[in-house]
Image: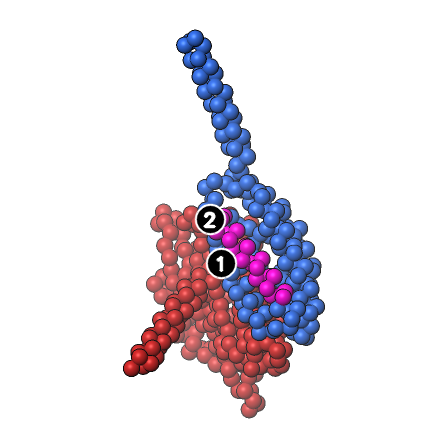
Amino acid sequence: MRARGLVRWGAAGLALSLMVGLLAWSVEAASGERSQRGDLIVALQGEVAPLQLPRHESAPVHLHLEGGLLTADGSLLPRVDRVEIGFPAKGVISTRGLPVCTLRQLRNSTSEGALAACRPALIGHGSVVADVLLPDQGVFRIHARLLIFNGPRKHGHRLLLLHGYAPKLPTTVVLPFMLERQRGRFGITIGADLPATLGPWPHLARFTLDLGRRYRFRGRPRSFISASCPIPPIFTEGFVSLARITYTLVGGREVSQAITRRCRGL
Amino acid sequence: MKIGTQWRKWAVALVLALALGGAAVAAAEEEPTRDEYVDQLEAICKPDALATQRVMKGARSDVQHERLKLASRKFAKAGSIFSSTVKEISAVARPSADRERLKKWFGYLKQQERYLTKITAKLRTEEAIAAQRLTARFIHNGNLANNVVLAFGFEYCSFKFSRFG
């Protein structure tokens, strides 16, 4: 009887500690890593799934990122001229065999229209919240749905086309992100200039991005993103610099934030 | 007689008031604003952060190739740099409005020091899993430390795991 009681208490304790653990994790996940320059706070949070990856070869993964900009005093966010996201050089991005979508197919389309035209080229999705400042109307926030498509090549680099559609202020924006390889820890980058013609859009507040697409090409399974957990057999987990986001603000000032995450070796 | 005693009391009170007033003025002069404090600390942290990056170069690769003792030596050097940085920045006068917050931050920094010492020891004895667990805590604790002083906008005094190899 006493033993059964202890078992019940043990189970309740375990459940409680799991709940506390999950709560702590979700609180941490909601904030992510942050840094502040002046009044501007940059936040980035992200994870890769699955967590458990082969040690010596790449396996298909799905990447989730969320982040944004915030001012400490609640003032209007600065205009962003350029966004660049870096991924680990050891990651693999493959668009081989993926259908291509063009800018023309996406222009002036709703999210549904973009999917109808380019669904086979879809490689990710997400959302964006931006502050819009219209003369004599103050600041208001808009929410847009994001779709990311495999685009054509330009100057030898693959383009990823980001399609944003805000239904409440019917507006479509298509931004070409250039996929490049560079030297350094974040050797794979996707970056886009946000042209002035976007008007009130560049006051970016926050975003979420989910990247990942599995497909078949010539009978073989492929993945838009693949990764490994390159750790020796004596370890069970490793630490990866997962992503870094850099915003170039109007006037040329840059703010960035990087995140490190765990991976488990298979 | 009575007048003489009163004069002495007044004179002592005056000397005390002047001394206390002088001390208060001196304290106010020594106490930096937050911006001045950040500048002072960053000047100390910058060379140390760069030195940490130098001594930790290749540590990630060492761990990946199971050269744990070599990695341990690099961690030991980084730990020593970190300890001397913490000691040096602890001595800098703090803005009174931020004292509690900074006390909490220095608490996290002390914990970081302990983690670095423990990671070094576990790598030296080739206890890989223990070193791995401690590294996870080291990263988590570093992020918590950063959150406490987010408003200070530190660059070199903030925790960045990328500096460690």
Subunit under mark 2: B
Task: State whether residue A10 appears in this view.
Answer: yes
Report the predominant secondary structure element of the magenta stretch.
Answer: helix
Q: The red chain is which one?
A: A
Seen from the viewer's position, the closer of residues B133 and A180 is B133
Task: State whether residue A207 appears in this view.
Answer: no
* Spatial separation of the CA atoms under disc 2 and disc 1: 12 Å
In the rendered image, residue B53, in percent from the top left (x then y), is placed at: 66, 59
10 Å neighbourhood of mark 2: few (<14), some, or many (≥20)? few
Colour in which chain B is shown?
blue
Q: Which mark is residue B101?
A: 2
Q: Give the range drawn in magenta.
A: B101-121
Of helix, strand and loop, which one carries label 1?
Answer: helix
Q: In which quarter of the image is the C terminus of chain B?
A: bottom right
In the rendered image, residue B13, in percent from the top left (x then y), is placed at: 45, 20
Of helix, strand and loop, which one carries label 2?
Answer: helix
Q: Which mark is residue B34?
A: none
Seen from the viewer's position, the closer of residues B55 and A113 is B55
Query: For the residue marked with disc 2, what is the amino acid?
Result: Arg
Subunit under mark 1: B
Seen from the viewer's position, the closer of residues B24 and A228 is B24
